[in-house]
Amino acid sequence: MSMNSLKKYEDILEGISGGFFALDNQYRILYWNRAAEEGTKLLRDEVLGKHVFEVFPNAEHAEIGEMYRLAMKTRKFQTLESSYVDHRFEKWFDVRIYPNDGGISVFFQDITEQKREQRQKEMLMEVSHVINVAQHLDELCLNAGEQIAKFMDIPTKFVCIYRFDARSSLLHLMAPAITDVNINTEVLHQIVDVSTETIASQTTLKREVIITDELSKSTIAAQYLGEVEQHKLLSLISIPLIVQDEMQGILEVLSHKNVKYAGDDMQMLSVIANELSIGISRKRLMHEITVKNVELANEQKKTEEANETLKRFLATFSHELRAPLNAIVGFSDILTTDMEKIPKEKVKDFMKNINVSGRHLQALINDILDLSKIEAGRMELHVEAYPISYFVENVQRVLQAALDQKQVQLVFNIPDEVDNLVVDQMRFKQILVNLVSNAVKYSNKGGIVTINMRRIQYEIEVEVIDKGTGIKPEDMSRLFTAYRQGKNAYMADEGTGLGLMITKKLVELHGGKIWVESEWGKGSTFRFRIPIIVAGEIVESPDELTLIADTHRVVGSNGEQPLVLIIEDNPQAGQLVQAYLEEAGYKTEIARNGFEGLEKAKMLKPDVITLDMIMPVKDGWQVLKELKNHPLCAHIPIIIISITDDKKLGFSLGAVEYFVKPVSKNELLDTIGKISSRPLLRKKHPKVLVIDDDKSAAELVSVILESEGFDVMTALNGRRGIQLAMEEKPDLIILDLMMPDITGYTVAFQLKQEPETRNTPIIILTSHEVDEESKEQLQGFITGIMSKSRFTKRDLLREISTIEKMK
Ligand code: ADP
């Protein structure tokens, strides 16, 4: 070839945009064009004459080296796309190799950019795929986290995805999975506020991308700094996930690049972040819809069940109701019209008949109301600790007349270990009285009814044994339904036939079960078991409390701080409990609803669980039941914290007792007896003020009290009540909650404001359960009364410290 034509070729080779070089058969570089210089930043003089593998050492054993050798050997054209990486480059090339006379010519084109775009597109598709196919939010976050880790070429654990809960201002870590990393609760649920230094929290506040090298403020990386260094990770990128102005969460990733260059990946990351935000918000919406649907379905089911109950009830009980009512109307008709003509003993007889029928009707209506309330899911239990002796005395007293009449004796066998019970006082009494009264009723004259109680692991078992008539095998299955043996004729002093059905439901509401063994002619044994809910002894002085908090070093099952799982849907309430517990040296974990509570209980196996009773979707009693039935959780002590405990609220208003109307004389006098140790009531004729708009109710109370030597005044509305209270300064006030002018809550509240009446004990007497509206009213009071929160705190610490002692 002439110099001229050579020059011409050279001009062409210099002019082309791609890199070109030529090798001789010794692989020495003979030619190196300008584009090759520009593309590699290696100058012609540096490379000419050198072995190609000396210049590109990492090519020798790579596919590209193989291709050079192949072309050299076979003298055939070769083409490939290949990456080349060493300390100077990280590039992709499209390479064409032409054999020539002495060696090979190589044309190469830098396709790094295209390759990157292509890879990014694939990644993006992969990310949006995993986001779209995920069933749950967790799955979505975990899978997306994995893809993003691949994209960034970092370990999965360094991709954090947080979900933001605006209600509680908490960031909840969704990815990486808790099982992949060892992290504490503060990281799992990170509070977002100005004082929190973490990058995630800052990003949420600023709603801006943060790129930083302060890895110590990262979520996970801060705890794995060794690994961070090993992987040469230099910076952290934190991206807010926002959809339509609403913060959904945070994506936090580590980058191999330093702060200056980390932004290079931003374009791509923001596309991923966008997909992720939309995915999260969609899943959230779907979750909300599911929850709503479940709630709706529950509501509907309840309504249907209630309707069903009503139908069954009407079919069964219209007769039952009518019979005593007829007796009352009939006898009282005679008495009011022909009184003079009837002999005196007959009058007394008739009156007795009316009384007995009235009582029967009352019992029947009470039972029906109880049942309908249970069936409609509206019966809430108010559990608290009561000494066992309280129930023993109560059963004995309530059934005294029946016992005397049948000369039956009650024998209680209760070991010392069963010293108190955490139950709903009224409902537990009802269970016991129902079972024992049946046992007495079906005992033979002069018989013995035995009541045994014992602790079986985490349950209390109660046995009620009689040696009376027993139950026929064919009747056994119907016992706990609306059923009565002598069901043909109405007899006024007979039971309602609903007792056992109610008893069963009440036992179940306490998370327990009931069953029976019986032999016809020999007697029956009714047994029930309820889970033990632990509560502590009463710590009176605040000093003792501090003592518990400060010196009681708490130790959990694994020798570390014990973990308390707080199941609470209200974030503020949850945080409050958490604060109390953490201050006292416990580790805590919050679950926001029943489902989450169960999941976390199984996964984390906490030492103690605190449980809120009123939660959406799955309420506390349901959760309690499931926890107690689950092999992994059955042993975990549970403390019930029901914020909307009407009774407690009532008490914190200053009430010493809380009744449901109609109140029995005995109960009323009993309570008054309890508080009569107060000096004021030791007077000869203590003054009592009855405030009630229901005239006959007020009269009834007056009659009862006057016969016991009280000096009774009545006020038929709230205003008058307050006025009388101020003027007369009674020693005791009996107060109705529902009154037309101002409610009992207001009255109680106002009386507490005035120095004259502040210390007057108040007994609340209400005709029905406190409804939602009034509950709110009570709540309103309570926020104004500081002692409530202190009370909760003390209560809580003391209960937990008792559990610790029991271990
Ligand atoms: P009641 O109010 O009529 O007693 P219960 O629901 O308490 O209704 O009881 C239903 C039926 O179960 C009773 O009518 C009786 O036939 C039977 N029963 C309950 N307890 C006993 C017992 N201890 N011994 C024999 N029969 C019993």
Image (tube, rainbow, N blue to C red):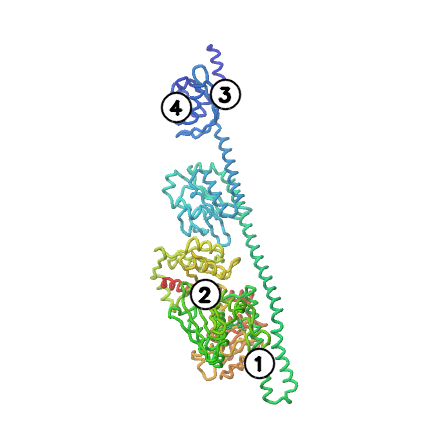
Q: Amino acid at mark 3?
A: Ile
Q: According to the image, label 3 marks what residue?
A: 16
3 vs 1, front mark:
1
Q: According to the image, label 1 marks what residue?
A: 355
3 vs 2, front mark:
2
Sequence-earlier tag: 2 or 4: 4
Q: Amino acid at mark 1?
A: Asn
Q: Amino acid at mark 4?
A: Phe
- Farthest residue to the right: give it: 337
Quarter of the C terminus within the rendering: bottom left
Q: Residues within 10 Å of mark 2 (few under 14, many from 20)?
A: many
Tag 1 and tag 2, C-beta contact below 8 Å: no
In percent of width and height, residue 395 lies at 46, 75
Asked if 60 appears above or below 360 in the picture, the reply is above
Q: Secondary structure at mark 4?
A: helix
In percent of width and height, residue 215 lies at 40, 43
Q: Residues within 10 Å of mark 3 (few under 14, many from 20)?
A: few
224 and 132: which is toward the camera:
132
Q: Amino acid at mark 2?
A: Ile
766 and 630: which is toward the camera:
630
Q: Is residue 741 left or right of residue 21?
A: right
Distance between the alpha carbons at the discs numbered 1 and 2: 37 Å
Sequence-earlier tag: 3 or 1: 3
What label sits on residue 530 in the rendered view? 2
Tag 2 and tag 4, C-beta contact below 8 Å: no
Tag 3 and tag 2, C-beta contact below 8 Å: no
In percent of width and height, residue 342 lies at 63, 88
Sequence-earlier tag: 3 or 4: 3
Sequence-earlier tag: 1 or 2: 1
Name which quarter of the figure residue 72 lies in. top left
